């Protein structure tokens, strides 16, 4: 079924402030086309109304300057040759030099076949320019239009901090027509669609052009706009945590109605943009990755989602790879990273072992302790095993009053020590897993009160946690990266030793 494709200029007109677009384009470089190719270029220009397969420039979104690169499919199927690649790279380099966020919207059949291999290798210089833009800690957003295939999808179309696609868009590496010509069969239906790639964790979402303006605005509010220090953040309350048995906290943390990371985002964040998956074809329903603002403070948020967990569905290696995506994003954008711990344990299965669960825990810990941006971890509920430890070693560690941290669930510890599970309450007490024990031992810095149980005050509790996160983000601004990292590492170097 045919569909109406939105042009590059129409896209820009519908996403950005009216009349704000300023072109950066100059006459395309001369690629010395032969007569046949020259005719094709002239015909394409006449048909499309543009002089190449891509237009670039700057536009405003709610007054905010943004660099724009948009493909025009009606010009030789949006294909990228030397001239188009030079235009793209020049725009990326200018955006980087001017410190602008960049929105790229490819729609392309890939490499321009009329120019052959020399066109093909242009994807390297485009990718290098995008890498330099991200190294400069500038946001890169991608909106994939129908269709986006070939080298374009396999280079600058797949490097966004946030990647969204047009509903129903054909998105894939090898176009279906080429596949059929090479292999004599149709490509499997439903694979190369925006919706399928979203479900599989390759892209972050699917949105229409009419939804794109608000989505880009929200993303840039977190990624580009400065922290808003005019928002009042409640002062830290006095630590008045009741001395209740550890087992009572364990029971409270397991309540089905206890608020988790989704309630935290809903009730305590002013702006949020949900992300999805690892970007590498994996997604895990037990975790949540998002851009967010708490008390006016922007951050990358990664949390274990109690709503997606069950005894038969615990966090696997993909969840930890998604956490590491969040760490990379925070580092690239120099944004605070907030990690929420609330897990009944990592997956115990053949699949988890064979897909590298333990190595992913190790890599998460390694990446987190060496991350050069500020980090805040929150033990919101259950903190069981390596899946919890992977998100723990932050600059500041907070714990909800009934949050806890243990190498195994107390029943598991009891099974090892007592050969039964009936001693779980005693093991919980003996192992020092409570928030007050963690505070005493230097594992956490602050305990967030529950009055008396988060399940009985989900909104107020979530707001309290959000305020605590915002306070820590603000406080961590006063430390240089090297000082923060030295303090972070020193904490774990001396943990467990009696005070001098």
Image: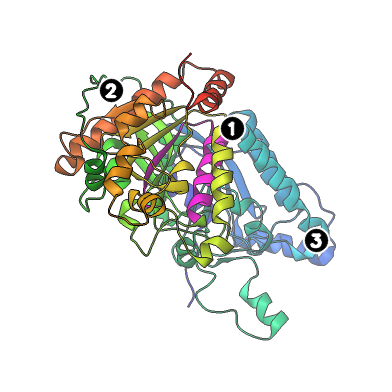
Numbered label attached to residue 370: 1
Numbered label attached to residue 115: 3
2 vs 3, front mark: 2
User: Which residue appears at 85% of the width and 54% of the height?
Assistant: 32
Residue 74: in sight, yes or no? yes
Residue corresponding to mark 2 = 233
Quadrant in which residue 111 is drawn: bottom right
331 relative to 152, above or below: above
Crowd band around label 3 with a 10 angstrom C-alpha radius: few (<14), some (14–19), many (20+): some
Judged left or right of residue 42, residue 274 is left
CA gap, disc 1 to disc 3? 45 Å
Expressed as whole percent of the image width and height from the top left, the position of residue 474 reads 40, 21
Q: Nearer the viewer, residue 497 or 75?
A: 497
Judged left or right of residue 331, residue 307 is left
Crowd band around label 1 with a 10 angstrom C-alpha radius: few (<14), some (14–19), many (20+): some
Expressed as whole percent of the image width and height from the top left, the position of residue 396 reads 42, 27
Color encoding of the figure: rainbow
Dot 1 lies on which element?
loop
Judged left or right of residue 421, residue 319 is right
Judged left or right of residue 6, residue 359 is right
User: Which residue appears at 21% of the width and 42% of the height?
Assistant: 248
1 vs 3, front mark: 1
Magenta span covers which residues? 318-344
Q: Nearer the viewer, residue 219 or 232?
A: 232
Q: Is residue 339 magenta?
A: yes
């Amino acid at each position: 079924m045919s569909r109406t494709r939105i042009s590059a200029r129409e896209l820009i007109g519908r996403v950005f402030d009216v009349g704000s677009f300023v072109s950066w384009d100059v006459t395309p470089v001369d690629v010395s086309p032969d007569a046949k190719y020259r005719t094709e270029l002239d015909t394409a220009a006449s048909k499309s109304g543009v002089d190449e397969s891509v237009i670039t420039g700057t536009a405003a979104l709610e007054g905010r300057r943004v660099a724009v690169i948009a493909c025009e499919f009606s010009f030789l199927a949006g294909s990228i040759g030397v001239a188009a690649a030079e235009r793209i790279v020049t725009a990326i380099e200018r955006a980087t030099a001017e410190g602008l966020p960049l929105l790229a919207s490819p729609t392309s059949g890939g490499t321009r076949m009329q120019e052959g291999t020399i066109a093909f290798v242009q994807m390297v210089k485009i990718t290098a320019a995008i890498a330099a833009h991200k190294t400069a800690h500038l946001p890169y957003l991608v909106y994939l239009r129908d269709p986006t295939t070939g080298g374009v999808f396999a280079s600058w179309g797949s490097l966004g901090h946030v990647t969204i696609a047009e509903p129903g868009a054909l998105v894939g590496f090898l176009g279906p027509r080429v596949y059929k010509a090479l292999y004599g069969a149709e490509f499997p239906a439903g694979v190369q669609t925006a919706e399928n790639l979203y479900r599989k964790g390759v892209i972050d979402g699917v949105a229409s052009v009419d939804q794109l303006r608000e989505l880009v605005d929200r993303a840039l509010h977190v990624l580009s706009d400065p922290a808003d220090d005019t928002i009042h953040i409640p002062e830290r309350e006095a630590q008045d945590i009741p001395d209740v048995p550890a087992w009572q906290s364990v029971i409270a943390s397991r309540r089905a109605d206890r608020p988790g990371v989704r309630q935290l985002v809903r009730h305590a964040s002013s702006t949020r943009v949900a992300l999805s998956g690892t970007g590498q074809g994996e997604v895990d329903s037990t975790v949540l990755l998002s851009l967010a603002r708490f008390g006016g403070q922007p951050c990358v948020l990664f949390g274990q989602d109690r709503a997606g967990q069950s005894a038969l569905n615990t966090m696997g290696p993909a969840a930890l790879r998604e956490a590491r995506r969040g760490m990379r994003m925070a580092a690239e954008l120099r944004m605070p990273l907030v990690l929420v711990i609330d897990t009944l344990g990592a997956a115990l299965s053949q699949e988890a072992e064979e897909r590298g669960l333990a190595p992913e825990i190790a890599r998460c810990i390694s990446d987190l302790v060496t991350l050069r941006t500020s980090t805040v971890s929150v033990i919101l509920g259950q903190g069981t095993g390596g899946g919890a430890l992977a998100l723990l070693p932050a600059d500041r560690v907070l714990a909800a009053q009934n949050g806890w941290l243990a190498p195994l669930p107390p029943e598991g510890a009891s099974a090892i020590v007592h050969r039964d599970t009936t001693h779980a309450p005693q093991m919980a007490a003996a192992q020092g897993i409570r928030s007050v024990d963690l505070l005493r031992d230097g594992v956490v810095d602050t305990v967030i009160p529950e009055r008396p149980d988060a399940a009985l005050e989900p909104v107020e509790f979530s707001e309290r946690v959000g305020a605590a996160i915002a306070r820590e983000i603000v406080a961590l601004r006063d430390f240089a990266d090297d000082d923060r990292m030295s303090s972070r590492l020193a904490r774990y170097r001396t943990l467990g030793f009696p005070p001098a």
